[in-house]
Every structure is written in C-alpha cells, then in structure tokens.
C-alpha cells in the first residue's frame, strides 16, 4: 500500500496533439512490428482519395512507390483538401486535418454523402507516424504546399503557382522511430489498389513502382463481378452451372452483391462497407446469410423439391459459395459504427434489412433460370446429406470411445503432465533427432513434444480426403484434440500454445510454411484465436574470449552474426559453431535458447488479411507453378546454394 502514497495529480500524464498516436500506435493501425501496420498507413491516405471518387468528385488516383521503397505518394483529382483559415482555430484547414485527431469533413453528410474514413483520425495518424509528410493541394485557382514531421508542422501553408486543376497529393515516409522495418511491398500495394478499383466501378487507379520501373493501371467496369472472376481464376475453380449471381440496390443504402456456388466444400464471403474491408463481417453479412436462407427455403417449398427427413441448414446452403458484399451507407441515413479504428466489423443493425431484402431476390433469379436452380438445389441437398452422415459417424465414434482427453493420443507424442490447456504447450518439431533433444530439454510439467517425420502434407494442394489419409497430419490433429475443418471445436484444444519448432535453414522454413498452411486451411479458428506460434532457433553459437571472461552469444541469422563479429572483433579469440539442425544441440542448450519461456523468442502467427494470405499460399504452394516460377526468376540474384 505504501507504494501508492505518492500518486498525485502531478503524476497524471496528458498527451497533447498527436502524442497519443506516437505513444500507442497499435491502437490506431493495429501494430508496428510487421508489414500490416506499415501498409495500413497507405490504406488511410488511399481511403481519403477513394472517398472523393465514391462521392463523384474524382475518377483518377495515382499511387507512386518511390525508388527508396520506403516512401509513397497518393494523388487524386478530387476537390482538394480545404486550405482556407478555420474560423475558430485560426489555422489552415489542411493543417488542422493533418495535425489534430478527430478533425475532418465526414462527421456530417454535408460534404460526403458516404465515406470510409469516419473518425477523423486517418490522415493525422499517418502524419503522426511519418518522419516526413508533404501535402500539395490544387484548389481555389492555386497550388498549395505544407510540410510536416512526426505530427508537427514544419512549414506554414505556402501558395505556389496558379492552376486550374483540383486535387490532393500526399507524400509520406514512415518513421524509423516507430516501425522496426520500413519496406513497402509492391505486391501488397497492387493487391490493395486492385481491391479498391474492383469496389468502385469505373475508378481508374494507376500504380507507378519506381523501385523497378514498372507501372500498372486498374479499372473495372463490371465491379464486383470482375472481382469474383479474379478470385475464381486465382483458385483455379469454376462457378457451378457457369453462373455468377449479381444483385444491386441503388436507393438509400446502396448494396452490391456478387456470388456463386462452386464444387469446393468451403464457404468464403468478403464484405465491405464504404470501401472498407470488414474482415470480421457484421450486420451486412448477417443480412446476406439470412436473406439467402429465406430465398432458398421459399423456392424449395414453392417448387416442392424438399426431401423428406432431410434437414437443410444455412450452412448447407452456403457450402462451396464464394461471395462479395459491398455496402455504401450515406451519412444522411446513419453514422457507421465500426468495431475500433481498424474497422474489422460493422455493428449497424439498420444495414441488415436492405441487404436481406436484396438477397431474397435470389428466389426470382432462380425462378427465371430453372436449370441453374436445379443444380443449386441438388448441390445444397448433397451438402445436407454429407453433413448428416458425418454427424452420425461422429456420434457413433463418440459413444464408443468415451470422453477422456488423453485417449487415443499418438504414440510418438511426449505429453506433458498438466491437464490445463492455458498452462500447456505443444512443440511440433522436425524429425526424431530434434524430438529427442526437445523431449530431454523440456519442462515435462507443461511442455509436450510431437516429432514429425519428413515434410508434412501440402495442405494447399491437398483435398480433405488426402488429409484424412496422412498419418503425420492425423497424429497432429489427434494430439491437439480439437478436430479440424467445419467440425473443429476450439474449446477442446489441449494446449494453449501450439509452437512450430524447426531447423533454422531452408528445409526448416519450408516445413514451418507447410505447417502454417495446414493450420490456416483446416484449423483457422486456432490461428485467429492466437494459439499458433513459431519458435526462433539459433543458427550459430559464438564464443568470444576464454576462461572467466568468455562470452557466449546465440545468433539467429547471418546478418546478426556479421554485426556481432564486427562489434567484438578486438575482444579476443572467437569460436563459431553453426547448427545444421536442432538435433545437434544438446538438451541444455535447446532449453536455454528455444524452450525456456523466460529466454526464448516466440513469434505469434496472426492473420491480418485472409484474402491476401490465401492468395500468397496458393501462389507458393498451390498446384499452379507459374507464380513460384515468377518469384524464383525475380529473386534469383538473392538465392544461395547450400551444398
């Protein structure tokens, strides 16, 4: 209690201006460790340009990734951010927008009928987290410029040359004090720009990549239909009955939907509100699912095609469906309610009804195309039968084997003694040699070890049937205890941390990639919930000096090794041990570097963009080798041969 006696008013910190953003950037962009937060800055500036287009004031956006690969310029031909002096704050509106949280023109519907940036924090957050930001505005007959750094004004607003053009250009370079690594991905940028072009019919977005001199343009007259066709092409699948359903509602809350059924067993729905991707769905997706169920049930009832004793669920109706929903909500109708600044989930209940009403028109669509309708209904009924058969089989097995959580565990699993998932960890290791060291070095109370033999099954290219035939995969699923696919029950997971531990070489990285692909495709809820990790194992042990003054360093990369040797070059004798594999490390060393919770390095695997992850995995591990060939050709100069 004595420690709190000095807690007084003077101890209260008041963060002014944009300091809250710099103090806690993760609250505004989701994180600063990986590429997601870095590219979120681009999305914030791009969304402002797209809002101009969405409201009919712009039809062209230019995005430039500069030669350094660390800075970007976004230019639109919209109205231009206002530059006149604000009557209350006596500063140019441009300066207020870029240096003040919750300042913007989108809180009412006077300037923007609809917009994705609604909190008035996007542009100012980018400014706060940028080492340098320059705004050039063409408006009121002149070109205007103002410069900023780390959220603060560097120069006053300057009136430059006369011009009849209008628009806004924002240059920004992210701050090295905030981001661990600053390197924009041209592929990721292209994906973001293409998505925006798909969602805004007729909007042209040009991308100039100065790092390699390439350029691309994106413009789609058919909008979501083109988007869906692109997804189908990437996944190399065909729409069932060669039919893509396109639904549109133009009045009030605008709704566009494109979807189709496929032969896949997975359902995939992408949703957007005012151009913002809602990865966690929300009320618009609820409306789509509800409307589709009502439309299908009504069609089956009217046409008397329902089979007796066959219960068809909403899940059956959506099996194999790929769909895209885009909702445009005017500010005059309602203010959007997102879950957090990163806008992952839509919470407005009033959006559900118009989406549901539009989706119910699928019944009319089916009435007008009886051949397509027959194929759809047959597809749904087959899904219902398969689900019923699987449920029956599961119940039969359940009655026979009982409920013990330790029953039927694989023999090669060295389990831990704890039965509390929140305290338990499972290390998935590469081979029996590494497994032996890990089993000896671990904390047996809380750490279990499961060795794998050889490379795990490539889940991206494998079917469900192939998965069920693979012993290594079945052993892993059995050890985890939570099942997989649509029957997965996360509350049955036996370990709070599932840790991939492989050698620090190319083979090890390949195996880790295959495991991550397996979890992403068949056990995605486990990844979403933050249970999957990758352990970093050392590549070198470096001893510097001898005797009492000997230093031991565990090094995880060649770059780190070179940096260490350079800094310690004059400190005495140096011995370097390179580990070809974890099996070469004795149990004690493995505990100190990789297993001990107090000293190890774990990377939590998280999904920032499911669509992008799917695309990357398909390119790297899918059946079509064209994307892998392209990557190898582009990166051939960086490849090394380890003989």
Image (cartoon, grey):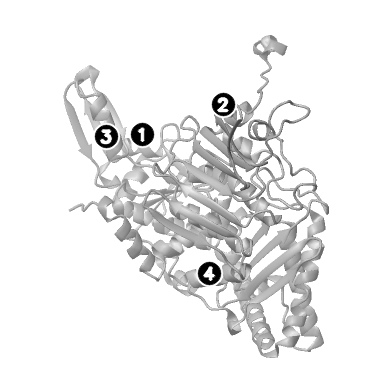
Going from N to C along the chain, the mark reached first, 3 or 1, is: 3
Q: CA distance from mark 3 to mark 1?
A: 19 Å
The x, y position of residue 549, in whole percent, is 24, 18
Going from N to C along the chain, the mark reached first, 4 or 3, is: 4
Q: CA distance from mark 4 to mark 2?
A: 45 Å
- Residue found farthest to the front: 162
Q: Residues within 10 Å of mark 3 (few under 14, many from 20)?
A: some
Residue for badge 1? 592
Quadrant of the rendered image containing residue 420: top right
Q: Nearer the viewer, mark 1 or mark 2?
A: 2
Residue for badge 3? 561
Helix or strand or loop: what does disc 2 sit on? Answer: loop
Q: Residue at x 38, y 39 (%)?
A: 594
Going from N to C along the chain, the mark reached first, 4 or 1, is: 4
Q: CA distance from mark 1 to mark 2?
A: 52 Å
- Labels 4 and 2 touching (C-beta < 8 A): no
Q: Quadrant of the N terminus?
A: top right
Q: Residue at x 38, y 65 (%)?
A: 627
Residue for badge 2? 155
Going from N to C along the chain, the mark reached first, 3 or 2, is: 2
Q: Nearer the viewer, mark 4 or mark 2?
A: 2
Q: Is residue 509 above or below residue 369?
A: above
Q: Residue at x 69, y 10 (%)?
A: 5
Residue for badge 4? 230
Q: CA distance from mark 4 to mark 1?
A: 48 Å
Q: CA distance from mark 3 to mark 2?
A: 43 Å
Helix or strand or loop: what does disc 4 sit on? Answer: helix
The x, y position of residue 437, in whole percent, is 32, 44
All told, the count of numbered labels is: 4
């Amino acid at each position: 209690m004595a420690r709190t006696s000095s807690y007084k008013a003077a101890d209260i910190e008041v963060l002014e201006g944009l300091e809250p953003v710099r103090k806690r950037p993760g609250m505004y962009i989701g994180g600063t460790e990986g590429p997601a937060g870095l590219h979120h800055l681009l999305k914030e500036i791009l969304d402002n340009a797209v809002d101009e287009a969405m409201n009919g004031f712009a039809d062209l956006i230019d995005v430039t990734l500069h030669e350094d690969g660390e800075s970007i310029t976004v230019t639109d031909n919209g109205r231009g951010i206002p530059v006149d002096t604000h009557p209350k704050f006596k500063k140019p509106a441009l300066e207020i927008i870029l240096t003040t949280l919750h300042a913007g023109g989108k809180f009412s519907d006077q300037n923007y009928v609809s917009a994705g940036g609604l909190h008035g924090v996007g542009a100012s957050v980018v400014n706060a987290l940028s080492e340098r930001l320059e705004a050039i505005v063409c408006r009121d007959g002149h070109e205007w410029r103002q410069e900023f750094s780390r959220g603060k004004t560097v120069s006053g607003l300057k009136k430059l040359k006369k011009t009849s053009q209008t628009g806004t250009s924002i240059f920004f370079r992210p701050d090295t004090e905030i981001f661990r690594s600053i390197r924009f991905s041209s592929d990721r940028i292209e994906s973001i720009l293409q998505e925006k072009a798909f969602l805004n019919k007729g909007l042209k977005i040009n991308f100039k990549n100065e790092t390699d001199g390439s350029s691309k343009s994106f413009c789609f007259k058919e909008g979501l239909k083109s988007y869906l066709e692109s997804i189908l092409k990437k996944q190399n699948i065909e729409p069932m009955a060669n039919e893509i359903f396109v639904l549109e509602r133009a009045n009030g809350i605008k709704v566009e939907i494109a979807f189709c059924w496929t032969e896949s067993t997975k359902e995939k729905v992408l949703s957007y509100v005012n151009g913002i991707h809602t990865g966690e769905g929300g009320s618009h997706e609820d409306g789509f699912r509800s409307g589709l169920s009502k439309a299908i049930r009504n069609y089956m009832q009217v046409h008397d095609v329902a089979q007796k004793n066959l219960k068809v669920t909403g899940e059956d109706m959506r099996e194999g469906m790929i769909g895209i929903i885009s909702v445009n909500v005017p500010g005059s109708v309602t203010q959007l309610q997102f879950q957090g600044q990163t806008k992952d989930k839509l919470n407005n209940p009033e959006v559900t009804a118009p989406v549901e009403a539009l989706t119910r028109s699928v019944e009319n669509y089916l009435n007008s195309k009886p051949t397509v309708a027959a194929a759809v209904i047959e597809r749904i009924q087959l899904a219902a039968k398969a689900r019923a058969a699987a449920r029956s089989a599961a119940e039969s097995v359940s009655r026979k084997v009982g409920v013990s959580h330790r029953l039927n565990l694989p023999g090669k699993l060295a389990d831990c003694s704890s039965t509390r998932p929140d305290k338990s960890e499972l290390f998935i290791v590469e081979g029996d040699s590494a497994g032996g060291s890990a089993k000896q070095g671990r904390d047996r109370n809380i750490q279990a070890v499961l060795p794998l033999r050889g490379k795990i099954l490539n889940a991206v290219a494998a079917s469900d049937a192939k998965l069920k035939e693979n012993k290594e995969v079945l052993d892993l699923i059995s050890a985890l205890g939570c099942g997989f696919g649509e029957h997965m029950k996360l509350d049955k997971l036996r370990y709070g941390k599932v840790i991939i531990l492989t050698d620090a070489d190319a083979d090890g990285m390949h195996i880790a990639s295959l495991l991550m692909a397996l979890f992403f495709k068949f056990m995605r809820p486990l990844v979403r919930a933050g249970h999957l990790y990758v352990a970093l194992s050392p590549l070198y042990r470096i001893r510097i000096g001898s005797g009492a003054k000997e230093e031991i360093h565990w090094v995880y990369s060649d770059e780190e090794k070179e940096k260490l040797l350079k800094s310690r070059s004059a400190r005495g004798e140096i011995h370097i041990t390179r580990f070809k594999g974890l099996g070469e490390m004795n149990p004690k060393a493995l505990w100190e570097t990789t297993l001990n919770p107090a000293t190890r390095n774990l990377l939590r695997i998280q999904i920032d963009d499911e669509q992008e992850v799917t695309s990357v995995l398909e390119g790297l591990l899918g059946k079509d080798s064209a994307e892998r060939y392209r990557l190898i050709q582009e990166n051939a100069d960086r490849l090394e041969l380890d003989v």
